[in-house]
Amino acid sequence: MCRNVGQLLIEWFPNMISHPRLAYADEGHGPPVVLLHAFPLDGRMWDAQKEALANQHRVVVPDFAGFGRSQDRKPRSSLDEHAEDLADLLSALGIECATVIGLSMGGYVALAFARRYPKRLLGLGLADTRAAPDSPEGRTARDQNIELVQRDGVKSLVERMLPKLLSEQASTDVVARVRAIGNSQSAQGVSAALAAMRDRPDSTSLLAGIDVASAVIVGSLDAIATPTEMRDMAHRLPRAELTIIDGAGHLANLEAPLPFTRATLALLARASERSARA
Ligand code: MLT
């Protein structure tokens, strides 16, 4: 049973909350939804969805430790630690349960959260992400990317990643936005996240036990988490709806904000039906 004490209570009695470890945005009123960002970005990648969802929902958008406005927090060495940070943040905000939506690295953290705190999930959105762990070649590539960041800085990694993060159809504005957010991250935070993603566990067997409303969303041109892999993820989740966004790449919410937002609103409606019945 979820007991979300609500924003007003927190605003009236701020001393009852512990100090959250993460920087975050917290906007709107209604059933809570959390948006977890991709790598090597921060919560700013969700600006369009935050605005759209805040009409009907309380939208919480953290910056993971080591990223964005949480760059001064100690970077985490595992995705489980990022999930713990999220649980602490939600508790500090008086939110017992929420729909959690993560894109790519945000999806890895959402899966870690689902594994560790299943009772705190109202719904789950997995966008352009993977349940499988890194292959041996993928792990080697992570190590090479850590070396690159240490040697040449974050900008070199961002330039290397851009062709995979965005499709060739992405607008120049979106490319510039991703470059600016990526380039503003610290080498320390980025290196720690690369190691955490390299060492993430296989979450494939977790999927069958996730019994909340879920959504699997992927850009049809995603070269990192392919539509084939995400279709398989949707088949394994008992209550998933799959949305393939035509013509969008890996950062589908940035390349195709409207269809992406529609898919998240559909998930939130299904998650709210369930919580209203409970
Ligand atoms: C992301 O977008 O978060 C990363 O591309 C994920 C990854 O490298 O596995």
Image (spheres, grey):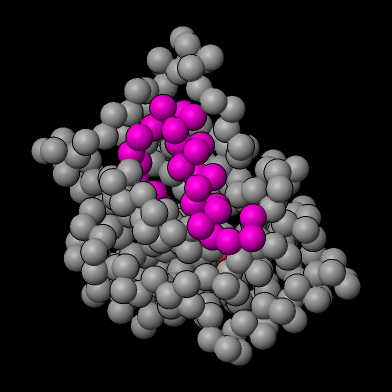
Q: From what the image shows, is residue 166 above or below residue 134?
A: above
Where, by quadrant of the figure, is residue 171 drawn?
Answer: bottom right
Q: Nearer the viewer, residue 66 or 88?
A: 88
Q: Residue furthest top?
A: 12
- The image quadrant in which ligand 1 is located: bottom right
Q: Nearer the viewer, residue 222 or 135?
A: 135
Residue shown at 58% from the left, 89% from the top: 136
Q: Nearer the viewer, residue 55 or 24?
A: 24
Left or right: 110 with respect to 23? left
Residue shown at 39% from the left, 32% from the top: 95
Q: How far across and how far down the image is residue 17, in percent? A: 50, 22
Q: How far across and how far down the image is residue 273, in percent? A: 16, 42
Q: From what the image shows, is residue 86 above or below residue 219?
A: above
Say which quadrant the C terminus sits in: top left
Q: From what the image shows, is residue 123 above or below residue 224?
A: above
Residue shown at 24% from the left, 64% from the top: 209
Q: How far across and how far down the image is residue 198, in percent? A: 60, 74
Left or right: 138 with respect to 98? right
Residue 94 covered by magenta stretch: yes
Q: How far across and how far down the image is residue 70, in percent? A: 68, 43
Magenta segment range? 76-101
Q: Residue furthest left?
A: 277
Regarding residue 247, the answer to whether it shows in the image is no
